[in-house]
């Protein structure tokens, strides 16, 4: 759990030198492209694999993190393959096993690629860049305030939870005692979170936190790398869309 | 001269409680005055500070810079106030230190470049200019305390309310905090248990005991009053046990 903070901005790749909003926007475009691209054709399959690999390589996430995400994607998405015998692939008659396997596999592959693109985007984004990055994207300011607070409070929540877990470990909550603690843990956790939420709400009230909290864009100059990245990400989204609409193939 | 903070016959009772947390309390904090507020745990120090900014319902009157703390004036009164919570993490609202410190000014419509420059100077004054670009999650409790204080100081509020500002600070941190407060152009009220810190930073001392407030000019007298409360409580406990 303590790695949650360390994960933000842990990537050491070329993408990290881009402007924060370009990194966020490109990640969103690629993620959307991932969701749209049809995987029945070889073009779609190769394009998705290529783009995901490139994004991960350019983000240069530490091997340890990459490995953890690989494990997570196996745990989360491998079970889709187990659904193969029940796949119908849109027809009433039972399709051949190969088709059913391809269908289940495409769900697993698409989800895995989305996960890796999201993880790589977070890895090239230090948590302190999120606010400014979002503020520079032309989206409603209410939305920015919401996302920034969501991230901030989630990090606080993780910090608080890890503190409670440390206390449990320190006080030797293992074995039979551990089971007893397991039942009281949600109550303790919930009460602490509620107190915390109450105090944060009070602080927000006193500090007059609101829509003005969004930093204003200072009209920064984009570098060539920024422009190139956003063009590539947009191109991927457009191609995915066209493939989906079966215009190209 | 008009007081910066004025409590007139303020009584606070939390909903569902049979006893008042604070009963009929009146006091004033004057311009540029530093006042310490002592009291045992649960005596109502934090409640009193929260009431000053209208976060706790009360009867009686509270004025900040002659502005009555009531529903229609709340934001106006709060704008005159800097507040430091006893758990600084709760009042840090941004994932970057500089954004958090500058927020008080940005909210008032000051351009972000100017606000960030001022935030840098406040952080430098507190001895932590190097953490401006960091995330608060990377920092220690003491550093977060300074960020929260910087956020409260940046608007040059006429009143600064500090709740246990020395908790978790090392001796050096306490000394530098006392120095900063010494130069701050605000009236300050500090709720604390730290008698040494209070004697270094404040000129007047209030003690909350048995829901009421007592005023002292000397820190030792205030400490004696506080210790008297402790022994009273202990005696009460012993006689109850007997």
Image: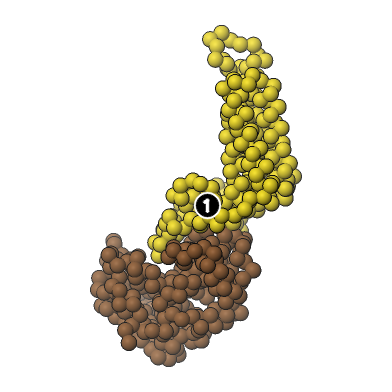
Task: Say which residue label 1 marks.
Answer: A135
- Kindly indicate which chain is depicted in yellow in the rendered structure: A
Residue toward you, B194 or A5: A5
Splitting the image into 4 quarters, where does residue A120 fall?
A: top right
| Above or below, comparing residue A44 to residue B224 in the picture | above
In the depicted view, which residue is nearer to us: B229 or A239?
A: A239
Q: Residue at x 66, y 25 (%)?
A: A44
Color style of the picture: by chain
* Chain ID, mark 1: A
> Whole-percent x and y of residue A103?
62, 20
The quarter of the picture where the C terminus of chain A appears is top right
The relative height of residue A226 versus residue A198 in the rendered view (above or below) is: above
At horizontal 69% and vertical 46% (from top left) the residue drawn is: A225
Nearer-the-camera pick, A185 or B62: B62
Secondary structure under the numbered disc 1 in the rendered image: helix
Q: Is residue A172 left or right of residue B237?
A: right
- Residue B146 visible in image: no
Is residue B168 positioned above or below B33 on the image? above
Count up the numbered dots: 1
Residue A37 appears in the picture as rendered: yes
Please tell me whether residue A48 is drawn above or below residue A188 in the rendered image.
above
Q: Residue at x 48, y 73 (%)?
A: B153
**What is the x, y in percent for residue A79?**
62, 28
Colour chain B appears in: brown
> Nearest the camera: B205 or A123?
A123
Residue shown at the point (28%, 72%) measured from the top left: B68
Q: Position of residue B133 (x, y in %)?
A: 61, 62
Quick one: label 1, few (<14), some, or many (20+) residues within 10 Å?
many
Residue B50's x, y, as percent? 37, 69
**Within the image, what quadrant is residue B41 found in?**
bottom left
């Amino acid at each position: 759990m303590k790695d949650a903070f360390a994960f933000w901005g842990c990537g050491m790749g070329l993408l990290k030198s881009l402007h924060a909003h370009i990194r966020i926007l490109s990640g969103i475009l690629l993620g959307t492209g991932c969701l749209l691209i049809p995987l029945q054709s070889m073009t779609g399959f190769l394009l998705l694999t290529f783009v995901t690999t490139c994004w991960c390589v350019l983000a240069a996430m530490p091997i340890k993190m990459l490995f953890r995400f690989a494990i997570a994607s196996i745990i989360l998405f491998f079970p889709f393959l187990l659904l193969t015998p029940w796949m119908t692939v849109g027809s009433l008659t039972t399709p051949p096993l190969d088709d059913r396997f391809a269908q289940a596999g495409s769900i697993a592959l698409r989800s895995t690629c989305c996960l890796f693109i999201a993880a790589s985007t977070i890895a090239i984004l230090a948590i302190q860049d999120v606010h400014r990055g979002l503020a520079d994207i032309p989206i409603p300011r209410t939305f920015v305030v919401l996302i920034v607070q969501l991230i901030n409070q989630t990090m606080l929540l993780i910090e608080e939870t890890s503190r409670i877990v440390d206390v449990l470990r320190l006080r030797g909550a293992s074995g039979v005692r551990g089971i007893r603690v397991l039942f009281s843990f949600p109550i303790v956790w919930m009460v602490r979170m509620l107190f915390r939420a109450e105090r944060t709400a009070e602080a927000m009230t006193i500090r007059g936190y609101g829509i003005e909290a969004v930093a204003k864009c200072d009209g920064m100059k984009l570098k060539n790398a920024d422009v190139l990245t956003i063009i590539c990400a947009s191109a991927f989204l457009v191609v995915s869309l066209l493939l989906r609409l079966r215009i190209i193939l | 001269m008009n007081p910066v903070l004025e409590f007139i016959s303020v009584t606070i009772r939390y909903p569902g409680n049979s006893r008042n947390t604070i009963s009929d309390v009146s006091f004033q904090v004057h311009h540029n005055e530093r006042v310490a507020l002592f009291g045992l745990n649960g005596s109502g120090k934090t409640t009193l500070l929260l009431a000053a900014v209208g976060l706790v319902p009360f009867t009686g009157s509270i004025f900040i810079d002659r502005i009555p703390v009531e529903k229609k004036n709340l934001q106006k009164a709060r704008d005159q106030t800097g507040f430091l919570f006893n758990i600084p993490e709760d009042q840090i609202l941004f994932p970057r230190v500089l954004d958090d410190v500058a927020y008080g000014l940005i909210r008032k419509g000051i351009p972000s470049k100017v606000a960030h420059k001022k935030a840098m100077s406040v952080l430098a004054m507190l001895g932590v200019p190097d953490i401006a670009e960091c995330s608060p999650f990377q920092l220690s409790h003491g550093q977060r305390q300074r960020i929260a204080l910087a956020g409260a100081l940046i608007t040059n509020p006429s009143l600064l309310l500090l709740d246990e500002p020395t908790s978790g600070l090392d001796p050096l941190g306490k000394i530098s905090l006392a120095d900063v407060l010494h130069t701050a152009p605000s009236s300050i009220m500090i709720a604390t248990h730290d008698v040494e810190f209070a004697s270094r930073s404040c000129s007047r001392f209030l003690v909350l005991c048995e829901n009421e407030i007592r005023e002292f000019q000397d820190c030792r007298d205030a400490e004696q009053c506080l210790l008297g409360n402790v022994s009273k409580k202990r005696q009460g406990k012993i006689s109850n046990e007997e």
